[in-house]
């Protein structure tokens, strides 16, 4: 009897031990599952917090570019259909086709945008690579802005196609032939026909002419006179096309020179924005007066895409405009390097570089900081812009429960 009672006690104890082991295993599994869920939930928050500045920069550039083109389109329509229309009735002069009126209109639109309406994320896509070469921003940031700017431009073009539609294709070929027929452009007033072609052997010249014409092909029309004009003036036709490409490169180079001056004087001299806009419009005005320039200058990759899409330019012609705009940017980058500034000025303009890094590259003999020796990897991401877009992004992140300090979390 005692033996049976003893065995039953052992059995009960073993059951209790087994039950406790199962409970521990179950609790441990539950803890692991809870920990896993918490960890999974915390991953997107950590990602958002760690990449807060980059996300704001990317979305901000995309939205700001879309708003910029929309603002220019709307205000341009208002000025042309209200102000210019009223002035034309009084003076009997078409201000919409005048060069001076167009420059004044562009200056007013850009001034109002940059001074009062911009979200702070402005600049041509290549301009940010230009800033990265000057160590004002990092290369990674420049790449993000480049892509985001293009996305914003394409978004605007897509919306405009849905809402406004596309106009008839603009024939650059027809414009060139019209100016040749009217005598507005002659061999002596175009670069290649004046200087280069007379010095080349006939075989080389003809090959070069054909190559240039391939970038802007002549579209045969029903007019025998136009076709005859083209075949009789192929040298001049190709020369005008090359003049347009070279003009885009030169004006882009001059634009980057003006932007370079603006970047390092905007905090020291008054009215730098107004002076930059005025000088840019002077460059545009003198360029537009040349009849051998049939398109542009745009001095901006985004504006080339905008014009090529809305005017439905030939793809290869648009591509070469982009290539020569890029060459203008590369030319400016070659000649314009990071300046040697005093420590005070360097700290003012290079806010993304730590004070210790600037002091490390300070030349004690001259008292100047050698910015070119600052490694681009040490350039910190730019702060979120203190504009309506930047404040909107901060509110969105805070609403999602993500701190907006921009610091990395462990």
Image (tube, rainbow, N blue to C red):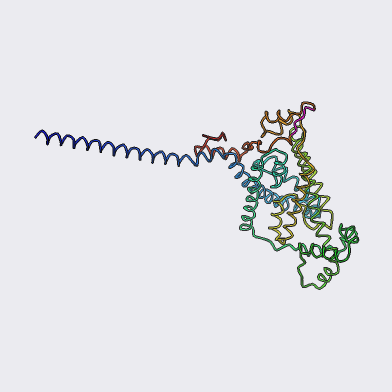
The image shows residue 38 at horizontal and vertical percentages of: 43, 39
The image shows residue 124 at horizontal and vertical percentages of: 70, 47
Q: Quadrant of the N terminus?
A: top left
Foreground of the two, 213 or 338: 338
Foreground of the two, 243 or 286: 243
Q: Is residue 45 magenta?
A: no
Task: Tell which residue pokes out farthest to the left in this image.
Answer: 1
The image shows residue 252 at horizontal and vertical percentages of: 77, 48
Q: Is residue 165 above or below residue 226?
A: above
| In this picture, residue 39 sits left or right of residue 342 | left
Task: Tell which residue pokes out farthest to the top in this image.
Answer: 364
| In this picture, residue 310 sits left or right of residue 237 | left
Foreground of the two, 117 or 142: 142
Give the total of numbered labels: 0
Please tell me which residue is depicted at 81% across the width and 69% down the height of the picture: 226
Q: Quadrant of residue 296?
A: bottom right
The image shows residue 333 at horizontal and vertical percentages of: 76, 44
Q: Main secondary structure of the magenta part?
A: strand
Q: Is residue 101 above or below residue 268?
A: below
Instruction: Give the residues drawn in magenta, as a range.
Output: 366-370
| In this picture, residue 7 sits left or right of residue 117 | left
Q: Is residue 283 above or below residue 294?
A: above
């Amino acid at each position: 009897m005692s033996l049976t009672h003893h065995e039953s006690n052992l059995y009960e104890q073993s059951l209790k031990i087994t039950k406790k082991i199962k409970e521990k295993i179950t609790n441990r599994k539950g803890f692991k599952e809870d920990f896993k869920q918490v960890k999974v939930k915390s991953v997107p928050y950590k990602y958002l917090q760690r990449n807060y500045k980059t996300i704001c920069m990317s979305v901000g550039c995309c939205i700001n570019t879309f708003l910029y083109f929309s603002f220019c389109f709307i205000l341009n329509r208002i000025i042309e259909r209200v102000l210019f229309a009223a002035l034309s009735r009084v003076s009997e002069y078409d201000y919409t086709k005048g060069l001076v009126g167009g420059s004044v209109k562009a200056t007013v639109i850009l001034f109002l945008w940059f001074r009062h309406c911009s979200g702070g994320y402005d600049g041509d896509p290549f301009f940010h690579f230009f800033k990265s070469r000057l160590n004002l921003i990092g290369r990674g940031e420049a790449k993000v802005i480049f892509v985001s700017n293009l996305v914003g431009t394409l978004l605007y073009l897509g919306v405009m196609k849905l809402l406004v539609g596309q106009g008839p294709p603009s024939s650059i070929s027809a414009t060139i032939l019209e100016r040749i027929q009217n005598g507005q452009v002659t061999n002596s007033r175009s670069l290649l026909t004046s200087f280069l072609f007379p010095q080349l052997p006939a075989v080389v010249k003809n090959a070069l002419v054909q190559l240039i014409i391939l970038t802007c092909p002549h579209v045969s029309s029903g007019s025998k006179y136009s076709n005859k004009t083209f075949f009789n003036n192929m040298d001049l036709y190709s020369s005008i096309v090359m003049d347009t490409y070279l003009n885009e490169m030169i004006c882009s180079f001059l634009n980057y020179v003006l932007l370079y001056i603006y970047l390092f004087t905007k905090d020291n001299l008054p009215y730098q924005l107004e002076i930059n806009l005025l000088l840019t419009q002077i460059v545009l005005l003198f360029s537009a007066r040349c009849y051998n320039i049939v398109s542009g200058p745009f001095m901006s990759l985004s504006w080339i895409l905008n014009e090529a899409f809305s005017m439905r330019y030939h793809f290869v012609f648009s591509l070469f405009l982009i290539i020569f705009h890029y060459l203008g940017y590369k030319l400016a980058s070659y000649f314009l390097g990071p300046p040697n500034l005093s420590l005070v000025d360097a700290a003012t303009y290079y806010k993304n570089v730590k004070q210790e890094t600037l002091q490390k590259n300070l030349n004690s003999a001259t008292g100047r900081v050698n910015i070119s020796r600052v490694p681009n990897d040490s350039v910190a991401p730019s702060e979120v812009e203190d504009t309506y877009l930047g404040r909107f992004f901060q509110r969105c992140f805070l609403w999602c429960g993500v701190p907006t300090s921009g610091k990395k979390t462990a």
